[in-house]
């Protein structure tokens, strides 16, 4: 298993290099616990690591990654609510001051929303069920038929997730009180350009 061996070798480089260089910080995090000011909700795509893109240090970001960086609306019904649990912990437990929804180009989850995510599962797939979160946005994009539906839906999905975050009562309350700010961002893999959402215009512009 050379792939896993490469991970272990990477750990050894980290342990003898970056860990030693940041030992004081790791000791502080171990003794005092974490208090990250920022939560980043991003895709699990291997090409879009928020720690790499934002060049963060340990303890700076509370990270949540899932297919297509989606946030479901607030609900308390049945099922497992892993994303909602992480949001609850980040906001109520860690008291983060910022939440960033980070989308990206060439997203497989967004492609699945447009084309279907059948990966061989019998019946309806987990991916299809999950990306239904942006079902209404997808239907609008399909109806409007833009030149680049993939990018259009990638950007719209960020806005949907931001809207869904505001359905959580504890987020809406903190945002209204000025204690929490929500941000949208979009990373272009091929060119390495980060676009940030302007909340006034609803448009994304290079950072």
Image (spheres, rainbow, N blue to C red):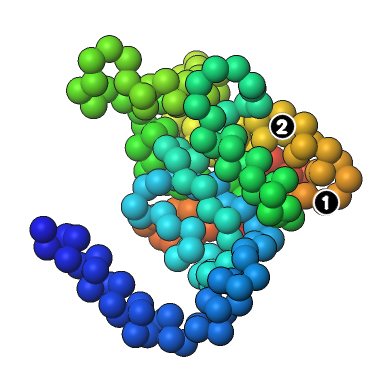
Q: Which image quadrant for residue 62? A: bottom right
Q: Which mark is residue 89?
A: none
Q: Is residue 18 above or below residue 198?
A: below
- Residue drawn at x 24%, y 68% as measured from the top left: 8
Where's residue 66, x and y in %? Answer: 45, 40
Identify the element where label 1 is drawn: loop
Crowding at dot 1, Cα within 10 Å, few <14 / some 14-19 / many 20+, comes out as few
Question: In this orientation, which residue lies closer to the viewer: 14 or 109?
Answer: 14
Q: Read off the residue under disc 1.
A: 179
* Direction from residue 4 to residue 57 in the image, left or right: right
Q: Which residue is at 37% across, 27% downward?
A: 127
- Residue 174 is situated, as x and y percent measured from the top left of the image, at 82, 44
Q: Is residue 66 visible?
A: yes
Q: Is residue 35 left or right of residue 144?
A: right
In terms of secondary structure, where does tag 2 sit?
loop
Task: Point out the tag, 2 or 1, that comes first from the N-terminus.
Answer: 2
Q: Which mark is residue 168?
A: 2
Q: Is residue 40 above or below residue 201?
A: below
The Cα atoms of the two marked residues, 2 and 1, are separated by 15 Å
Of residue 169 and residue 118, the one placed in the foreground of this image is 169
Asked whether the viewer can see residue 185, the reply is: no
Relative to 170, is 11 above or below? below
- Mark 2: few, some, or many residues within 10 Å (few <14, many ≥20)? some
């Amino acid at each position: 298993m050379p792939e896993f061996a490469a991970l272990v070798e990477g750990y050894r480089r980290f342990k003898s290099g970056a860990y030693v260089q940041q030992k004081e910080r790791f000791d502080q995090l171990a003794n005092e616990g974490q208090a990250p000011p920022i939560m980043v909700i991003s895709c699990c795509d291997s090409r879009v690591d928020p720690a790499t893109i934002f060049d963060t240090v340990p303890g700076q970001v509370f990270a949540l990654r899932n297919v297509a960086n989606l946030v479901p609306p607030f609900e308390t019904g049945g099922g497992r609510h892993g994303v909602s649990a992480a949001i609850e912990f980040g906001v109520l437990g860690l008291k983060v001051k910022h939440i960033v929804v980070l989308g990206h180009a060439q997203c497989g989850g967004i492609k699945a929303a447009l084309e279907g995510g059948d990966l061989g599962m019998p019946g309806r797939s987990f991916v299809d069920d999950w990306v239904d979160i942006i079902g209404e946005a997808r239907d609008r994009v399909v109806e409007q038929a833009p030149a680049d539906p993939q990018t259009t839906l990638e950007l719209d999905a960020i806005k949907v997730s931001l809207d869904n975050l505001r359905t959580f009562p504890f987020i809406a309350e903190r945002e209204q009180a000025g204690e929490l700010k929500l941000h949208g961002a979009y990373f272009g893999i091929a060119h390495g350009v980060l676009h940030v959402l302007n909340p006034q215009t609803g448009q994304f512009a290079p950072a």
